[in-house]
Structure formats: structure tokens, C-alpha cells
């Protein structure tokens, strides 16, 4: 493998000049830069990233810990993070927490040990001492999608409040009055928030969210199936099930079909987190879409700002309702109630 000394000899310049060219330093003549780059190409020289990190105290590497790599939402988020990081000259190491706090902390600890420059995390719970300590000790960090309240770390997320209100307005306009929700884990901010917003949106139409219509899920398909089976066993089942994430919605759809029932004829279905699969289900599923790619890119930019000594701002982007046929006829959504 060619060394930096080999490049210098090939180009007829000093090792220092080669180093300045590789680090894009402005104090190099155009001729010297051309010769160095030609020598790099001829010799197939690759800089030693480990040695460079020891000199600069930077690895040009970001860590990303996502909640569930099998969830299409987080898969798309990871893709946009990697693309944006690469465009800014960074690599990304990804850890999958699988919705487990212990596995989340394992990945965070491993990434910190590898001297990453900064950390993106979608927390699986709100009380990880390891992450709290990392935030306090100055590790550049950004929360994405979920966050830990009270921790002074930028948060990049979507705001689904308006979209949930639009959903309830749509359902009310279709004549639905008995609405249920499959909630996500209460230990996550998104799990709690989506239930609260749904309840508030129902209240605007004089509707309540009974305990019997609130099922506890875990952002996994199996929990969506089990909760929906419980709803269908009630003496007065709901008319609509709103799943607080996409995988639980697919589980709910399985439960309806297993009973020989149909969506939306026997039970209407809607979901938070739109995914590409929803247009291929029968019927296509009404869902709240988050700007996933934009969130990933914004999270990387906020983290790089912090790494490079800039503040790094929190970002909130609006989600939107995508109406399909899983709740009934595809009517134009009615206006939200203002009462």
C-alpha cells in the first residue's frame, strides 16, 4: 500500500505539501495540487483514517441508534441520515436498539468507545443514565423522532398534531363516532403524545376516548394484532382503530382478516407513519405521513453544527394526512371543529 512519502516522491513535492492538499488547505499552488492528486490516483493512495483521527481528534464518523431497523420508517430515516452525512464528509455507524433500552445503551456505549464525533439517537425510553451522562459531558448529540424531556439536546422531529386533528375531522365527516387507538409504549415521547393528541382531537367533536378503546401496544405488529382482537371482542366494538405506528396497523389488519371481517366495512383502520406498503394493501390504508427524509437530513445538519462548534438548532416539521380507502369512502375531509 502506498504511503504519503510515496505520493510526495511521485509528485516531486514535500510530505507537508501532500498533507495540505489532502486536507484541502488553500496555501498550495494549483500546479502542486494537480501533481499531488495525479500521484494519489496513480499510486492508489488511501489516507490512514485512524492516524488522521489521532492527529485531528476527529474520526469524521457519526453514530446513529435507531429504535427498530425492521420498521420502514426508521429504515428510511437511516438512509437519509447516511446520504446527508456522506455529502458532508462523514460516515455513519448504525446500531439497532430493537425497542430495548439495554440494547440501546449497548450501542451508545460502543459508539462512544469508537470515538465517534457525534451521536444521533431515537430513544427507546426516557431515563437512560448513559445518554444523560453523555449529554452532560458535552458529547455532540441530537435526538431524532423521539426525545428525552428536560435534556438540553436539540430535537429534530415532526409535529403530528395538525394531522391527527385532520384525521379525526375526516373520520367524523364519514359518520364514525366510536374511535379507538392502539398506543405506543408510554415510556416513549411519541407513544404518549399520539394518545394525548388523539384524545384532544376527539374532544373537539364532543367525543370521548374510553379506557376500553385505548389498547397498549409496543410499536410491533403482534401487539397491534392482539389489541385489535380485544377491541373486536367487546360488546360494542369501535368503528375505527387508529394505530399509533405502521407496524401495529399491519397487525390490526391481520386481526380483522383472521375474523373473516373486512376493512372498512366491518372496522375502519388508520395509522400514524405512512409507508410505501400502504398503497398496496387491500384496501389502501389512510395514514399520517412524516417528512422522514427531511427529518434525517435536518438531524445530520444539526449534529454537524454542534460538532463544528455551532449551536445546532431543534427542528420541527409538520406531518400530513394521506386519505385512502381504509376508513370508508374517500370523501374530502371536513373542516376541523373549532369548539
Image: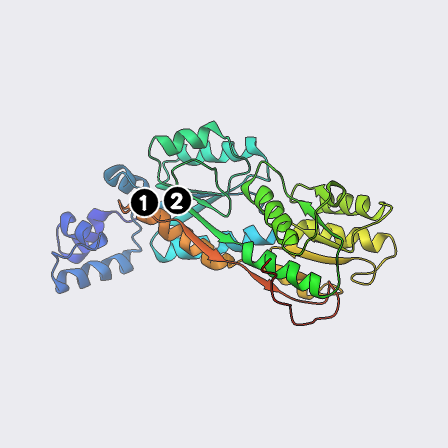
Q: Is residue 37 left or right of residue 338?
A: left
Mark 2 secondary-structure assignment = loop
174 to the left or right of 256:
left
Q: Please state the horizontal and vertical placement of residue 59, each as a whole percent of the image.
A: 33, 42
Residue 41 visible in the displayed image: yes
Tell me, for residue 198, which label it has, or none.
Answer: none
Badge 1 marks a residue whose secondary structure is: helix
Give the class, few, some or many, for how many residues have Cα within 10 Å of label 1's Cα (few <14, many ≥20).
Answer: many
Q: Residue pushed farthest front?
A: 339
Res. 306 mark: 1
18 lies above or below 324: above
Left or right of 1, for residue 275: right
Q: Is residue 60 above or below residue 260?
A: above
**Mark 2 Cα shell of 10 Å, populated few (<14), some (14-19), many (≥20):** many
User: According to the image, what is the colour scheme of the structure?
Assistant: rainbow
Q: Residue 53, percent across and down? A: 29, 40
Cβ atoms at labels 1 and 2 below 8 Å apart: yes
Question: What whole-number distance in Å separates the C-alpha atoms at marks 1 and 2?
Answer: 9 Å
Disc 1 or disc 2, which is closer to the eye? 2
> In front: 238, or 228?
238
Number of callouts: 2
Query: Which numbered tag is attached to residue 154?
Result: 2
Residue 285 visible in the displayed image = no
At a point 78% along the width and 52% down the height, the residue shown is 238
Quadrant holding the C terminus: bottom right
- The one nearer the camera, 325 or 93, is 325
Q: Position of residue 138 (x, y in %)?
A: 33, 34
N-terminal of the pair, mark 1 or mark 2, is 2
Q: Residue at x 83, y 48 (%)?
A: 232
Q: Position of residue 187 (x, y in %)?
A: 58, 36
Residue at image point 34% right, 30% down: 137
Amino acid at each position: 500500500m502506498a504511503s504519503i512519502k510515496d505520493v510526495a516522491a511521485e509528485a516531486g513535492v514535500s510530505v507537508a505539501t501532500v498533507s495540505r492538499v489532502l486536507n484541502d488547505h488553500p496555501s498550495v499552488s494549483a500546479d502542486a495540487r494537480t501533481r499531488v492528486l495525479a500521484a494519489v490516483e496513480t499510486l492508489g493512495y488511501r489516507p490512514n483514517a485512524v492516524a488522521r483521527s489521532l492527529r485531528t481528534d476527529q474520526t469524521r464518523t457519526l453514530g446513529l441508534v435507531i429504535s427498530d431497523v425492521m420498521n420502514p420508517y426508521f429504515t428510511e430515516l437511516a438512509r437519509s441520515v447516511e446520504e446527508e452525512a456522506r455529502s458532508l464528509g462523514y460516515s455513519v455507524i448504525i446500531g439497532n436498539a430493537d425497542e430495548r433500552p439495554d440494547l440501546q445503551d449497548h450501542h451508545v456505549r460502543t459508539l462512544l468507545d469508537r470515538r465517534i464525533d457525534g451521536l444521533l439517537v431515537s430513544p427507546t425510553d426516557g431515563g437512560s443514565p448513559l445518554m444523560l451522562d453523555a449529554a452532560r459531558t458535552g458529547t455532540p448529540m441530537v435526538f431524532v423522532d423521539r426525545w428525552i424531556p428536560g435534556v438540553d439536546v436539540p430535537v429534530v422531529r415532526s409535529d403530528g398534531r395538525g394531522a391527527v386533528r385532520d384525521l379525526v375531522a375526516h373520520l367524523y365527516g364519514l359518520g364514525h363516532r366510536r374511535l379507538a387507538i392502539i398506543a405506543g409504549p408510554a415510556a416513549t415521547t411519541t407513544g404518549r403524545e399520539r394518545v394525548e393528541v388523539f384524545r384532544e382531537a376527539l374532544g373537539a367533536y364532543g367525543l370521548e376516548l374510553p379506557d376500553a378503546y385505548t389498547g397498549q401496544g409496543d410499536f410491533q405488529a403482534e401487539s397491534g394484532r392482539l389489541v385489535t382482537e380485544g377491541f373486536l371482542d367487546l360488546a360494542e366494538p369501535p368503528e375505527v382503530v387508529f394505530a399509533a405506528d405502521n407496524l401495529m396497523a399491519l397487525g390490526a389488519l391481520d386481526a380483522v382478516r383472521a375474523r373473516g371481517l373486512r376493512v372498512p366495512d366491518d372496522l375502519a383502520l388508520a395509522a400514524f407513519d405512512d409507508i410505501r406498503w400502504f398503497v398496496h394493501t387491500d384496501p389502501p390504508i389512510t395514514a399520517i405521513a412524516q417528512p422522514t427524509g427531511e427529518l434525517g437530513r435536518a438531524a445530520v445538519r444539526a449534529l454537524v453544527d454542534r460538532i463544528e462548534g455551532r449551536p445546532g438548532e431543534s427542528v420541527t416539521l409538520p406531518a400530513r394526512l394521506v386519505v385512502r380507502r381504509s376508513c370508508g369512502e374517500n370523501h374530502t375531509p371536513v373542516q376541523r371543529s373549532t369548539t
